[in-house]
Image (tube, rainbow, N blue to C red):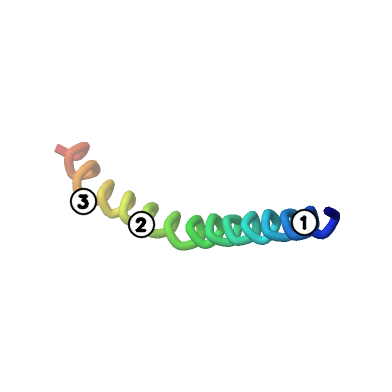
């Protein structure tokens, strides 16, 4: 009985750590990419529009 509990906790913890790692990686990779794309869009479309 205790063995089953240990296995469940271990699997749950491992899954949580994997999700956490994926989340951190996603933020580290995607946030700069999204920010760069947004800055490029701002520069290309919005700023010239404001100047006119």
Per the image, label 2 sits on a secondary structure element best described as helix
**Dot 2, how many residues are within 10 Å of its Cα: few (below 14), some (14-19), or many (20+)?**
few
At horizontal 38% and vertical 59% (from top left) the residue drawn is: 33
Asked if residue 1 is positioned above or below residue 49 in the image, the reply reads below
Circle 2/circle 1 CB separation < 8 Å? no
- The front one of 32 and 45 is 32
Task: Describe the element under mark 1 as helix, strand or loop.
Answer: helix
Q: x%, y% of residue 52?
A: 14, 37
Provide the residue designation for mark 1. Answer: 4
Image point (64%, 54%), residue name:
16
Q: Please provide percent x and percent y for residue 42.
A: 28, 46
Residue 42 is left or right of residue 3, and the answer is left
- Judging by the rendered image, the residue that carries numbered circle 2 is 36
User: Circles 3 and 1: CB distance less than 8 Å?
Assistant: no
Q: CA distance from mark 2 to mark 1?
A: 48 Å
Image point 32% across, 49% down: which residue? 38
Query: Among all residues in the image, which is located at the extreme right?
Result: 2
Q: Earlier in the sequence, mark 2 or mark 1?
A: 1
Q: Earlier in the sequence, mark 3 or mark 1?
A: 1
Between marks 3 and 2, how big is the CA–CA gap?
12 Å
Name the residue rendered at 85%, 55% in the picture.
Answer: 2
Residue at the spot of label 3: 44
Residue 25 image point, x, y percent: 52, 62
Q: Mark 3 or 2, which is nearer the eye? A: 2
The residue lying toward the viewer, choosing from 52 and 9, is 9
């Amino acid at each position: 009985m205790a063995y089953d509990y240990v296995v469940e906790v271990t699997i749950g913890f491992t899954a949580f750590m994997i999700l956490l790692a994926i989340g951190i990686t996603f933020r580290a990779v995607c946030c700069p990419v999204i920010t760069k794309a947004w800055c490029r869009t701002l520069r290309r479309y919005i700023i010239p529009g404001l100047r006119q």
